[in-house]
Amino acid sequence: MTEITGIVICGGKSCRFGNDKGMCMLGNKPMIHYSIDSLKPVCSEIIISSNDPKYNDLGYKTVVDTFEGIGPIGGIISALEISETEDNIIISCDMPFLNHELFKYIIDNKNNALAASPLFNGFIEPLCSYFNKNSLIGIKQFISSDNYKMIDILESINYKKIIIDDSLPFYDADLFHNINTPEQYEKALKILNFN
């Protein structure tokens, strides 16, 4: 089996949420552990991308942003630079309902793309994506134009959209539920039956 690195992006100021999301308790464990647990079945290594030193104590390799103030792509670049594998799955720490079956499906259907993202209900989910380490060259070239939008970056390289719908065995309507507000946090607790 090809070795895969799982990368959890914990950057951002979480202005709308009001707290550091990754370390916020969601039910019985910090939110970041949902991300880590979903990656473990398919990943040989996990990297945490964050400028906050509190993540250093979780027992995983951590990396700070090489390029600061440019959003998630800054963390992605830094993590890809230290990744030791060609294949990488990158997810945000605020999407607790992602699962390893989804990641395996993305890997199995990426073909020769340098990056691949789910297309779910008509929307691309860029912070749940496959990135080949070789995508770094194209990404760095693109952001030199000061455009840091994830969709634009993805479309600037050899990129594939992978449709995720209810025909797939791992499908769940809340698969890509992310937590940016207290209301979305409360909904997540209800999904987990903690509320």
Image: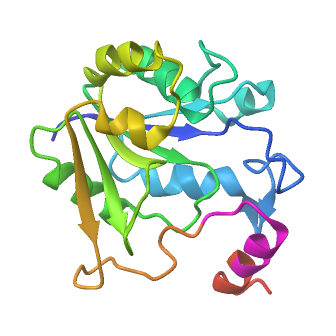
Left or right relative to 173: residue 75? right
- Out of 142 and 119, give the one closest to the viewer: 142
> Could you say where residue 128 lies in the image, as x and y percent from the top left?
43, 51
- Out of 136 and 99, give the one closest to the viewer: 136
Question: Where 146 sits versus 26, above or below?
Answer: above
Q: Residue reaching furthest left?
A: 111
Question: Where 182 sits versus 194, above or below?
Answer: above
Q: Is residue 27 visible?
A: no
- Asked which quadrant contains residue 187, the reply is bottom right
Q: Residue at x 59, y 12 (%)?
A: 66
- Out of 98 and 145, give the one closest to the viewer: 145
> Could you say where residue 182 lies in the image, as x and y percent from the top left?
84, 69
Q: Is residue 151 visible?
A: yes
Left or right relative to 55: residue 2? left
Q: How many marks?
A: 0
Q: Is residue 181 magenta?
A: yes
Left or right relative to 62: residue 147? left
Question: Where 160 sits versus 2, above or below?
Answer: below
Q: Residue at x 42, y 43 (%)?
A: 151
Q: How is the image coloured?
A: rainbow
Question: Where 39 sits versus 142, above or below?
Answer: below
Q: Which secondary structure is most common in the magenta stretch?
A: helix
Q: Is residue 118 magenta?
A: no
> Could you say where residue 21 lies in the image, as x and y percent from the top left?
76, 51
Q: Residue at x 56, y 48 (%)?
A: 92
Name the quarter where the C terminus is drawn: bottom right
> Could you say where residue 1 lies in the image, as x and y percent from the top left?
15, 41
Q: Residue reaching furthest right?
A: 18
- Asked which quadrant contains residue 167, the reply is bottom left
- Out of 178 and 26, give the one closest to the viewer: 178
* Residues shaded magenta: 178-187
